[in-house]
Amino acid sequence: MHNYLGLDIGTSGCKAAVFDEGGRMISLAHRDYDLQLTPDGGAELDSDLVIQHCLAAMAEAKAQAGGEVRAMSVSSQGEAFTAVGRDGKALCRAMVSSDVRAASYAREWPKGFGGERLYQITGHTAHPLFTLFKLLWLREHRPEIWSKAANFFCFEDLLHLRLGLEPAIGWPLAGRTMLFDVRRHEWNPEILAAAGLSADQMARPLASGSVVGQTKDGMLVVTGGHDQPCGALGAGVTQSGVAMYATGTVDCITPAFAKPVFSETLRQNNLCTYDHVAPELYTTVAFSLTGGNILKWFRNEFGQGRSYEELLAEMSTAPTSLLVLPYWTPSGTPYFDCETPGAILGLRLSTHRGELLRAMLEGVAFEMRLNLGILKNAGVALDELRLIGGGTRSAVWNQLRADVLGKPMTRMEVTEAGCLGAAMLACAADSGRPVNEIATAWARPGERFEPDATNSQFYDDQFVRYQQLRPAVRSIIGGKKSCAG
């Protein structure tokens, strides 16, 4: 029996899972770590601690599975990078996606380089979450680190370094740096030069599913990629009309394209185009940076020691009349709005905790509905959404999403789809089987949630009001700038 390991490196923790050659999960280990926030908008992770936890989770998962793993791959959070010295040691903490200190660079730098030109090379529109702008911030504000840095690695390639291998980075993760040409599949020399970088400071980019090397115990290490397309592969998203809906720290929808789509509609709405981890496919990412983390915030502030499950059990099963703008963080697509704060409209003394929680989750779902409409207008129509991630364990929450979006939702049997997608890539590299064939066999659908007609009609009307909420809040606070260039 051949076993394969998928490692998912997230913002709040990492997970390592081992799957047998039939795609059944036989072990799972996880480690949590804390995001460190700074008063100036910084959001950082201790890179060494993250890698230590990754190695510990991998060791535990392998031990639970009997010790033998043929190959492994990584599903990694995007954008976060670590400056590494010539001795291979980390020089700084990793600046993660929600770090907004580079907002001015994302607005101003593309004006000199050319925003349209940047999009045509990278498939992305400017936002401070991307590595390029974080590096520009580091160069100016942390010159002592910049001058000592021999390399800049994302978490996938940093793990390779710690495993004693020459670091490589999967095309989809490289794409999230905005330093990568997503059509030529190489670091773009013009962008690198304009940022004061060289290609030899970055990991070698390889197609997802390529062999990086072999560890001392004989395990193959295979390139994975950005966590969202890895999760999409784990959910079996290898054809048009179907997309992954992931709920973790963020809410995210990831479909599959047969070819790269560079559309003005997508560009104007900050919806990118870059490599899928499945071969010869592309994808986009529609996301709200306030996603499952809004539930964590609610629990920490108002939960009074209750678990997530207990709070969700208190939640009303009926739609609420409250309207919530879910901008507890900077927004994601389509607005890339760093200034407008979250808002709750319609509170009364009769409002109870379960109603407030439901309204907050409705707000996130409305934001994702907004993105679905834009994708449809750009020619990316989706008939089914496949649910993955920790936030899919609640049937009430899943039904809420189906009702708000008006789409059937299928909860996948293995919700740790990032780990599963990475393991699929490892299996394909080791066995020679086509990864799409493995995905068809391993991605097993579970419970299906159909929209409730009465609730969906209510949400159709509520969505009209929801679309007026952001402009109203912005007019009150005087917000004029977005995060985008």
Image (cartoon, rainbow, N blue to C red):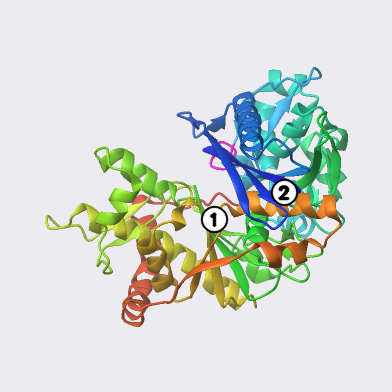
Q: CA distance from mark 2 to mark 1?
A: 18 Å
- Which residue lies under the disc numbered 2? 225
- Tell which tag, 2 or 1, sits nearer the viewer: 1
Q: Position of residue 435 (x, y in %)?
A: 78, 61
Specify the quadrant of the image occupied by residue 254: bottom right
100 drawn magenta: yes
467 drawn magenta: no
* Picture residue at 34% right of the left edge, 56% below the top: 360
- Residue 373 seen in the figure: yes
Q: Magenta part mainly helix, strand or loop?
A: loop
Q: Position of residue 395 (x, y in %)?
A: 38, 63
Q: Hey, what amino acid is under mark 2?
A: Gly
Whether residue 302 sits left or right of residue 195 in the image: it is left
Which residue ends up furthest to the left in the rendered image?
Answer: 349
Whether residue 172 sits left or right of residue 320 in the image: it is right
* Picture residue at 81% right of the left edge, 51% below the top: 209
Q: Position of residue 50 (x, y in %)?
A: 60, 30
Q: Secondary structure at mark 1?
A: loop
Q: Nearer the viewer, residue 168 or 364?
A: 168
Whether residue 160 sits left or right of residue 100 in the image: it is right
* Picture residue at 84% right of the left edge, 45% below the top: 205
Give the residues drawn in magenta, as a range. 96-102
Which class describes the residues within 10 Å of circle 2: few (<14), some (14-19), or many (20+)? many
Specify the quadrant of the image occupied by residue 439: bottom right
Q: Is the Cβ of the residue at disc 2 closer than 8 Å to that at disc 1?
A: no
- Labels 2 and 1: the sequence-earlier one: 2
Q: Position of residue 411 (x, y in %)?
A: 50, 64
- Which residue lies under the disc numbered 1? 415
Count the labels in the image: 2
Q: Hey, what amino acid is under mark 1?
A: Thr
